[in-house]
Amino acid sequence: MTGNRPAIPPAQVPQRDLLQLRVLPDERQLRADIERLRRERNAVILAHNYQRPEVQEIADFVGDSLGLSRQAARTDADVIVFAGVHFMAETAAILNPDRVVLLPDLRAGCSLAQTLTAQDIRDWRARHPGGLVVTYVNTTAEVKAESDYCCTSGNAVQVIESLPADVPILFAPDRFLAAHVIRETGRSLDVWDGACHVHAAIRPEDVQHQQAAHPGAELLIHPECGCSSRVLAALPDLQLYSTEGMLHRARASEAQTFIVVTETGMVTRLRRDVPEKTFVPVSRTACCEYMKMISLENIRDSLANLQPRVTVPEDVRLRALRPIERMLAIG
Ligand code: 13P
Ligand code: SF4
């Protein structure tokens, strides 16, 4: 295990029921303004599965980190509004140097991305000449620029399986995702000791509590979760899913009720796309304050002002593009 930088303390969550979609009366005008500005600016709104219900509702595309990167790579819009967090907007900017990329609130960061710096990778490489660095997409552009491959929870296993068996690999920064990849591939990895404060805080007891309340419900667990090793010890055949993987599983499964073990926004997405089934959040406190900083108000304002923009210096962009393109090519 490498590194031990603590996650930054989260910011405050704006109040509102984050699981219910209710169009508030004063939101009708906001939605109309967003609609008009979206057309005038030739803009696309990309939203992560953890976004607020009303933001998911107005987005052109809602998905996981991999799906959002793919959408950002293929868009022909002039403006990309990223309803997500900073590293996601940076990834869009790396893929789209000639388009305007807006992040409606620049404070929308990521505790996991902050656990690893570019210098940490340079130090690791100095200790492991010839090693390969695979970083989760939840990293800064500077960290990606020092990486050989990027991955998301949706393709981390395939990325590691595509690499030669005899070279040292640094897998960073999420230690729980790393444990999942090691279990699935049998590979030995040097693992960075980082975690997301939301997923790390989900306890096996939270899962057990919901299992007792919903007997027979199927578990949908994200590999970033701190509870996954202990839950898997009791249920060794259980699969873990990226947020988009959860959606596919919910559709394909014969189960009617699911316990959603990840950030609460995923429950919104599942309830909207699979309305005939029941989705229960593992804990209402599993809430990413950074994701929830994006609102209809700041989306409207960013479209009106074309600010705040996310840009990446060209030398960093060109080096960060390589691992992202390798990731997109793999799966
Ligand atoms: P995915 O949507 O790629 O599964 O990632 C989850 C996450 O925590 C993004 O910040
Ligand atoms: Fe980062 Fe965790 Fe929030 Fe995802 S849920 S953006 S990993 S802090």
Image (spheres, helix red, strand yellow):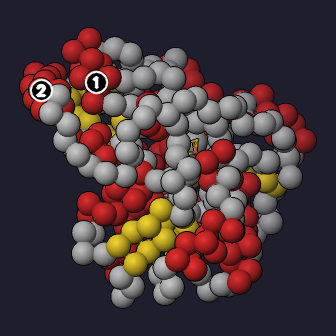
Q: Position of residue 132 (x, y in %)?
A: 73, 50
Left or right: residue 76 compared with residue 184: left
Q: Three-letter amino acid code at disc 2?
A: Gln
Residue depicted at x 46% and y 53%: 264
Q: Position of residue 165 (x, y in %)?
A: 75, 67
Residue depicted at x 56% and y 50%: 285
Residue depicted at x 79% and y 48%: 193
Left or right: residue 299 compared with residue 5: left
Q: Is residue 75 visible?
A: no
Q: Nearer the viewer, residue 265 or 16?
A: 16
Q: Is residue 220 visible?
A: yes
Q: Quick check: 180 above or below 251? A: above
Q: Quadrant of residue 186?
A: bottom right
Q: Position of residue 258 (x, y in %)?
A: 44, 74
Query: Mark 1 — residue?
Result: 297
The label shown at residue 29 is 2
The label shown at residue 149 is none
**Helix, strand or loop at disc 1?**
helix
Q: Three-letter amino acid code at disc 1?
A: Glu
Q: Position of residue 229 (x, y in %)?
A: 73, 70
